[in-house]
Image (cartoon, grey):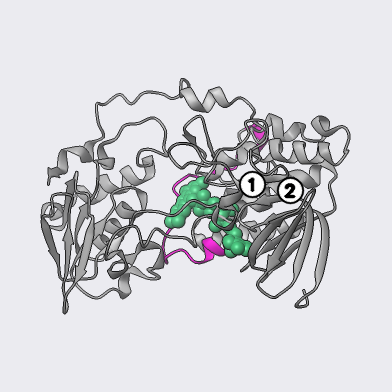
Amino acid sequence: MIASETIFTRVLIVGAGPAGLGVGLALQKTGVADMLIIDAREIGASFRAWTAGMSMLTPSFHSNAFGLTDLNAINPESSPADFLRTQHPDGLGYAAYLDAVAGHHQLPVSTGMEVTAIDRQADHFIVHLKNGGTIHCDFLVWAAGQFFSPRDRDFSGAEHAIHSSRVKDWSALSGDSFTIIGGYESGIDAALRLFDLGKSVRILSRGEPWSSDHPDPSRSLSPRTFDRLRAALRHPERKERIEFSKNTDIRRIEAGDGFWILYDHDELPIVCKTQPILANGYQSGLGLASSLFNVDAHGLPIFTEEADESTLTPGLFYSGPSLVHRKSLFCFVYKFRARFGVIAAEIASRLGKTQIDEKLLPYLKAGFMNSDLDCCTNCECAIESQHDAPEPAQFSQSS
Ligand SMILES: Cc1cc2nc3c(=O)[nH]c(=O)nc-3n(C[C@H](O)[C@H](O)[C@H](O)COP(=O)(O)OP(=O)(O)OC[C@H]3O[C@@H](n4cnc5c(N)ncnc54)[C@H](O)[C@@H]3O)c2cc1C
């Protein structure tokens, strides 16, 4: 795109990750051709930026033909397992899969286009780009993800730590003993990577995520992470090299000359000789679009149950891991993809497309068009764990 150019499109999707591409593919199925998908970086940029060696927690398996679509697929027809021949794609592999699907379906993706502001006009949006250009659209799908918005300024002195998403290579960190703030997936992953490199790690966590047996994998560690933890904890030296500190809420960090002091909720100091690692997740994925959504009393964005549209700004839809309905988080690909068909059907219908349900039948059959929000809210379908708590709990230490 030439700087200062103005583009007109009926549907604009911001973000060429799984959420944006997935909605684009569903829209394409309904016959919507006048659309554009833009990305500040490139297709699958967040996956390309993952730390070396990181891989997906959710397993891939090509069982699509039997009605069980690969958990990491972004449309009912494709499968990362089939494409990559692996069960847990790494970031580069998954980005290659996204690239391949977008290429195969000739999705209209333009990269290197960063949105800097959104103006809502009476009946359309004017989206401003960093290069000076603008895009006018009738419908806007915000799918900009969270990865590039780490929570690295959440408390005083947080900037003295290194956020886990910014570590490019765990083996490049110097030192033998590390402190990790956060005990969910990214914290445990960081700990295990360092453990595998022969380092000692101390994990400080607000609660005790490693012993949660909540049936929703968004609220407890994934089975894969438990497998990895068990394998590590079987190691004879584990007691010396992995320490779990539960109920430790770090509120402040001070940096000295070659040391760092972490203060918890009781102002108790914890001294570290290597830069602390912050594994506390990401900001809401709504970023620039935040002010165009209503929020509830807890600050969570509100989406229409009909089609994940803003209740404040008609025509603005959201796709991705910040989706919440009835307190359920849709933070994995297999969760938020359940709404791709729902969003596409709504936009296609407003654009006057016909036979939408027929065209999206594969989406409905494959669970990419789920309008039954009760199902994910009550978790009645979840199988209760047979154990009171997963094994790693026994290794927890009180703060
Ligand atoms: C280490 C790690 C492991 C994970 N493992 C799993 C897993 O096993 N299974 C799973 O389902 N999920 C997993 N996730 C979460 C998953 O990566 C995210 O849910 C997913 O990437 C969200 O997809 P998205 O398309 O919303 O966002 P993204 O993939 O982040 O894509 C958003 C895109 O928007 C672009 N963008 C951002 N801002 C702008 C802007 N202003 N203008 C234009 N473009 C913009 C970005 O460049 C980016 O390419 C993992 C995440 C991490 C960090």
Residue that lies at the very extreme toward the front in this rendered image: 122
Residue beneath the point at 37% across and 62% down: 152
Asked if residue 316 shows in the view, the reply is yes
Question: Contact, CB < 8 Å: mark 1 with mark 2?
Answer: yes
Does 245 appear in magenta?
Answer: no
Q: Residues within 10 Å of mark 1 (few under 14, many from 20)?
A: many
Quadrant of the picture in which ligand 1 is shown: bottom right
Toward which corner of the image does residue 346 lie, by quadrant? Answer: top right
Q: Is residue 386 left or right of residue 311?
A: left
User: Label 1 is placed on what type of residue?
Assistant: Ile
Q: Is residue 314 left or right of residue 7?
A: left
Q: Amino acid at mark 2?
A: Leu
Q: Kindly indicate the quadrant of the structure image that contains residue 314.
A: top right
Q: Position of residue 220 (x, y in %)?
A: 35, 38
Residue drawn at (70%, 39%) of the image: 343
The percent position of residue 295, horizontal first and vertical second, equals 52, 41
Q: Secondary structure at mark 2?
A: helix
Image: 184 above or below 1: above
| Label 1: element kind | loop
- Residue closer to the observer: 179 or 10: 10
The answer as to whether callout 1 falls within 8 Å of ligand 1 is no
Q: Which residue is mark 1?
A: 74
Of the two numbered discs 1 and 2 on the same chain, state the one appearing first in sequence. 2
Is 221 positioned to the left or the right of 71 in the image? left
Per the rendered image, the range of residues in magenta is: 44-67
The quadrant the N terminus occupies is bottom right
Question: Where in the figure is residue 2, as x and y percent of width and height?
Answer: 78, 77
Q: CA distance from mark 1 to mark 2?
A: 8 Å
Q: Which mark is residue 25?
A: 2
